[in-house]
Image (cartoon, helix red, strand yellow):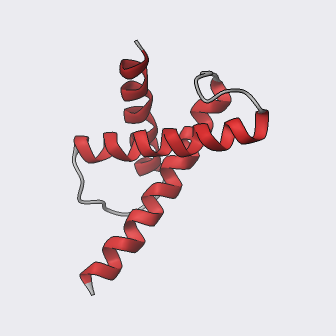
């Protein structure tokens, strides 16, 4: 059950991050999923540092931090891909 939840939350977080950050990204659904899962890990880690709860706890703030983490991961991805294109 945990893996399926991670995939669903990751897909939602990745899609919302791509909607929040303007611009085109040459990634499909798999890239969006990976972006969201990375964002979920980053957001979960930040949430566990702030709240003191374990990373396994799922709540609304964890979802919001997953989206924030996905936005950060998307911005880092864009910086890396822009440098490699030069």
Furthest-right residue in view? 51
**Taking 46 as reference, is 40 left or right?**
left
Look at the picture and state if 25 lies above or below 9: below
Q: Residue at x 38, y 68 (%)?
A: 78
**Taking 33 as reference, is 36 left or right?**
right
Q: Residue at x 42, y 27 (%)?
A: 6
Quarter holding the N terminus is top left
Look at the picture and state if 58 lies above or below 83: above
Quarter holding the C terminus is bottom left
Residue 58 figure quarter: top right
Furthest-bottom residue in view? 86
Look at the picture and state if 85 lies above or below 49: below
Q: Residue at x 45, y 65 (%)?
A: 76
Look at the picture and state if 47 lies above or below 25: above
Give percent across and percent down for residue 40: 50, 38
Tally of numbered tags: 0
Give percent across and percent down for residue 35: 38, 47
Give percent across and percent down for residue 16: 45, 42
Give percent across and percent down for residue 82: 33, 77
**Taking 62 as reference, is 83 left or right?**
left
Furthest-top residue in view? 1
């Amino acid at each position: 059950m945990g893996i399926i939840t991670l995939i669903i939350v990751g897909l939602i977080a990745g899609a919302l991050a791509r909607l929040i950050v303007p611009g085109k990204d040459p990634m499909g659904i798999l890239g969006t999923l990976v972006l969201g899962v990375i964002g979920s890990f980053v957001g979960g880690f930040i949430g566990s540092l702030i709240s003191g709860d374990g990373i396994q706890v799922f709540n609304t703030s964890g979802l919001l931090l997953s989206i924030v983490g996905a936005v950060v991961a998307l911005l880092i991805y864009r910086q890396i891909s822009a440098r490699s294109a030069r």
